[in-house]
Image: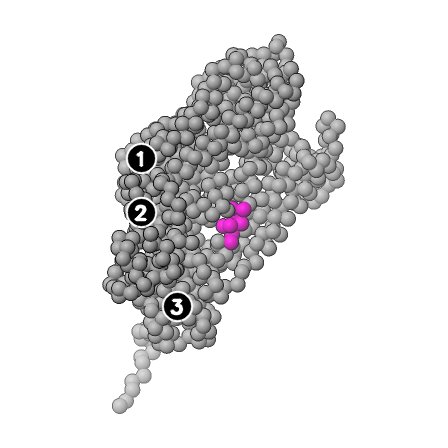
């Protein structure tokens, strides 16, 4: 593998140095820009947590988020003390914003595990720049998701009935119900994602511990670093464990949203009773999750100066995935329609015509325009690599995916088999407040994470640098010049700055790949 | 020369506890040098030694002669346990009506819903699957930490200022004093000969 060219951004003609999206066969695009020393990665990531005070925008966003958390607290308290009647639910529409938000947030979480696990198994090294905060996003999104089923049960204080706990009534949860599968699926998903995230973070927490100045930081980071000291015997088991966690998370991430879709698909309601739901929900989840990662990555890299680690190429790659999954979602929409017609089931056919042209037509067309039409713009490379446009489009995709869940849930319930039981759902201020509040909860958690924890997987990024390869020819060139020891701070000479050094006869066989 | 015996009530001037030598650390500046040195340390017949790196250096396991861990086998066992627990939990609670003693008496509750079979394997699969993943994942993280002797609050190596850069950009070889081939001065010289940029004794 010739990864030594990776750090030569100048090798890509016709582009600015920071643009590493050009495809040049035979030359690996750099994953990390403007860095040739491991120490630079450490400093760049740690400075966020080590700085005395974060940027002003952080305070602004934190204040807004915290305010929304207050709103969430108020709405939930009001709900618990009054009853679910404060939501706009009515007789046929017994699930609306609560389950919409639940499915939306679970979906958002999927990109994190996908980036961490599936891209890890596929040896996609570009994941290292974005996996840590995508995983954090997963954790916080699943927390937000878990909130909604918890509070929609009506008697919240009896939510423990969901768990198989021995009780004096000799009652057990009904394991043949998809709603209970959900409890296990989401519970497992949260636990495994958390373990995956935390285990991945341990070496980086050790970095923060070893650099910490104050006693509080030393104590806190020291506590969570678990005494990690980079032993190779530890790394050996650690890498096996991490690989296993990735291998276990991959089927898990596909199963979780499939199980969520079973909540609908196993019912007999027209519009829900669809076999395409499991793959369709998973594709939609990845679609919305990646859109959320881009939405978060764009301001984060700007705000905390991480543009050399989360490069344009990372964003470009994610936009390509959004394009692919957007097409899958579009296919699923059309296939649902086709099957509704082809099956000859009149209720099914009505449900779908009603979705597009009935009382919720606006929601349906928002969904289609946001989820099917918008991502098609990403075919254009100029759009895919334009920061403001991709940010806007990803926000649109997020809105569209929220509406997708709304359309599936509410349109099917509001107009079911019997026209006499039909009703129209209108959200109340409590519905809206709880939804906004969940975004606040997510934002608060995420901002705290950005401030105090390593936002980028330091150890993993270092391992993808060409200097990390023991056979990298730059070292021999550096040793040949005999000045390696005089570099007090540098582990590697910035050899891409002096191509002659790499072409020196003393270089390893890899060096020959450099010559054009 | 006459020696005076110490006065009986005088406090001992030497520290009550002598610090023990933990080992000697050699610092390297790049993975290539570390790998070359690791091969030689292994060749010299040391047993209680280790390399410390900021990130996993690929090929170092082979250079050090680390055998593959049995972690995956144990994780497979943990996963199978999860599958079994998942099935037994559902079969007991939803299909069996007998009672068992588990801190309290618990009784299964078979409840027939729309003629579905009590032990319906297809309906049990999602929960069995999730518990398989859950136990295997917790097992893989837990067993990894257990085998690595983590978490631990402190370690002699972490008392060395120099060693703290191991999580940043430095690479270390540590030869522990309990190694039968360890002789402080000779091992120190050995590490220097291997090209260590700095060598330091670490006390426990």
Question: In this picture, which residue range is highlighted in magenta?
Answer: A240-247
Could you tell whether A14 is left or right of B144 in the image? left
**What is the chain letter for disc 1?**
A
Of the pair A236 and B115, the residue shown nearer to us: A236
Instruction: Report, in whole angstroms, how far the alpha carbon at label 3 lies from the one at label 1.
Output: 46 Å
**What is the chain letter for disc 3?**
B
Other residues around mark 1 within 10 Å, as few (<14) / some (14–19) / many (≥20): some
Above or below residue A416? Residue B185 is: below
Q: Is residue A252 visible?
A: yes
Instruction: Please name the residue shown 72% across and 35% down the image.
Output: B120
Q: Are the residues tagged 3 and 2 within 8 Å (C-beta)? A: no
Secondary structure of residue under mark 1: helix
Residue annotated with mark 1: A58
Instruction: Please name the residue shown 36% across and 70% down the image.
Output: B194
Residue annotated with mark 3: B37
* Percent of width and height locating residue B178: 45, 72
Q: Nearer the viewer, mark 3 or mark 2?
A: 2
Residue A448: quarter of image: top left
* Percent of width and height locating residue A75: 45, 24
Instruction: Report, in whole angstroms, how far the alpha carbon at label 2 lies from the one at label 1.
Output: 36 Å
Other residues around mark 2 within 10 Å, as few (<14) / some (14–19) / many (≥20): some
Of the pair A4 and B125, the residue shown nearer to us: A4
Secondary structure of residue under mark 2: helix
Q: Is residue A241 magenta?
A: yes
Q: Does the magenta stretch mainly form a helix, a strand or a loop?
A: helix
Secondary structure of residue under mark 3: helix
Above or below residue B94? Residue A79 is: above
Instruction: Please name the residue shown 52% across and 32% down the image.
Output: A283
Residue annotated with mark 2: A11
How many discs mark residues in the rendered view? 3
């Amino acid at each position: 593998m010739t990864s030594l060219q990776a750090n030569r951004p100048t090798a890509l003609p016709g582009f600015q140095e920071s643009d590493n999206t050009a495809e040049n066969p035979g030359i690996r695009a750099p994953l990390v820009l403007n860095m040739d020393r491991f120490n630079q990665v450490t400093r760049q990531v740690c400075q966020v947590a080590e700085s005395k005070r974060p940027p002003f925008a952080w305070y602004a966003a934190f204040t807004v988020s915290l305010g929304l958390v207050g709103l969430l607290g108020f709405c939930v308290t009001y709900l618990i003390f009054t009853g679910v009647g404060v939501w706009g639910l009515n007789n046929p529409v017994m699930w609306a914003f609560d389950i919409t938000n639940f499915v939306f947030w679970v979906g958002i979480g999927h990109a994190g595990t996908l980036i961490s696990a599936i891209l890890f198994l596929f040896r996609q090294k570009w994941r290292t720049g974005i996996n840590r905060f995508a995983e954090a996003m997963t954790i916080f999104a699943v927390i937000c998701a878990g909130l909604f089923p918890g509070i929609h049960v009506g008697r919240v204080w009896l939510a423990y009935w969901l768990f198989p706990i021995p009780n004096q009534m000799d009652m057990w949860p009904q394991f043949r119900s998809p709603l209970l599968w959900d409890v296990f699926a989401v519970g497992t998903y949260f636990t495994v994602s958390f373990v995956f995230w935390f285990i991945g973070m341990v070496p980086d927490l050790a970095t923060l511990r070893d650099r910490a100045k104050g006693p509080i930081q030393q104590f806190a980071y020291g506590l969570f670093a678990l005494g990690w000291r980079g032993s190779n015997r530890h790394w050996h088991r650690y890498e096996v464990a991490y690989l296993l966690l990735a291998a276990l998370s991959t089927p898990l991430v596909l199963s979780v949203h499939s199980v969520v879709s079973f909540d609908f698909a196993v019912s007999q309601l027209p519009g829900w009773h669809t076999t395409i739901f499991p793959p369709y929900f998973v594709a939609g989840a990845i679609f919305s999750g990646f859109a959320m990662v881009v939405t978060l990555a764009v301001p984060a890299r700007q705000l905390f100066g991480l543009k050399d680690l989360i490069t344009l190429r990372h964003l470009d790659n994610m936009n390509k995935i959004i394009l692919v999954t957007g097409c899958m979602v579009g296919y699923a929409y059309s296939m649902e329609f086709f099957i509704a017609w082809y099956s000859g089931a009149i209720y099914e056919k009505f449900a779908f015509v009603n979705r597009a042209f009935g009382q919720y037509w606006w929601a349906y067309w928002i969904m289609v325009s946001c989820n099917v039409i918008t991502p098609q713009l990403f075919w254009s490379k100029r759009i895919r690599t334009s920061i403001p446009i991709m940010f806007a489009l990803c926000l649109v995709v997020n809105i569209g995916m929220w509406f997708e869940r709304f359309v599936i849930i509410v349109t099917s319930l509001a107009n079911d088999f019997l026209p006499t039981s039909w009703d129209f759902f209108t959200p109340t201020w409590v519905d809206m407040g709880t939804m906004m509040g969940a975004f606040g909860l997510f934002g608060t958690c995420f901002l705290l994470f950005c401030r105090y924890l390593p936002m980028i997987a330091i150890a993993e990024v270092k391992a993808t640098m060409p200097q990390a390869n023991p056979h990298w020819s730059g070292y021999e060139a550096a040793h040949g010049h005999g000045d390696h020891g005089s570099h007090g701070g540098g582990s590697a000479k910035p050899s891409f700055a002096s191509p002659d050094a790499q072409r020196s006869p003393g270089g390893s066989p890899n060096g020959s790949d450099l010559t054009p | 020369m006459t020696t005076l015996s110490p006065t009986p009530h005088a406090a001992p001037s030497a520290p009550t506890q002598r610090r023990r030598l933990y080992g000697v650390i050699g610092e390297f500046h790049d993975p290539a040098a570390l790998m070359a040195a690791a091969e030689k340390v292994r060749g010299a017949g040391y047993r209680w030694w280790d390399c410390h790196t900021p990130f996993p250096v690929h090929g170092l396991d082979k250079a050090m002669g680390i055998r593959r861990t049995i972690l995956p086998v144990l994780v497979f066992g943990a996963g199978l346990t999860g599958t079994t627990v998942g099935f037994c939990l559902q079969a007991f609670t939803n299909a069996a009506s007998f009672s068992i003693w588990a801190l309290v008496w618990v009784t299964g509750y078979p409840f027939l819903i729309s003629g579905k079979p009590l032990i319906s394997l297809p309906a049990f699969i999602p929960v069995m699957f999730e518990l398989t993943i859950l136990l295997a994942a917790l097992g893989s993280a837990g067993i990894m930490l257990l085998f690595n002797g983590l978490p631990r609050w402190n370690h002699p190596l972490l008392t060395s200022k120099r060693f703290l850069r191991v999580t940043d950009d430095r690479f270390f070889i540590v030869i522990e004093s309990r190694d039968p081939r360890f002789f402080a001065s000779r091992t120190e010289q050995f590490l220097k000969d291997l090209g260590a940029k700095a060598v330091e004794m670490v006390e426990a």
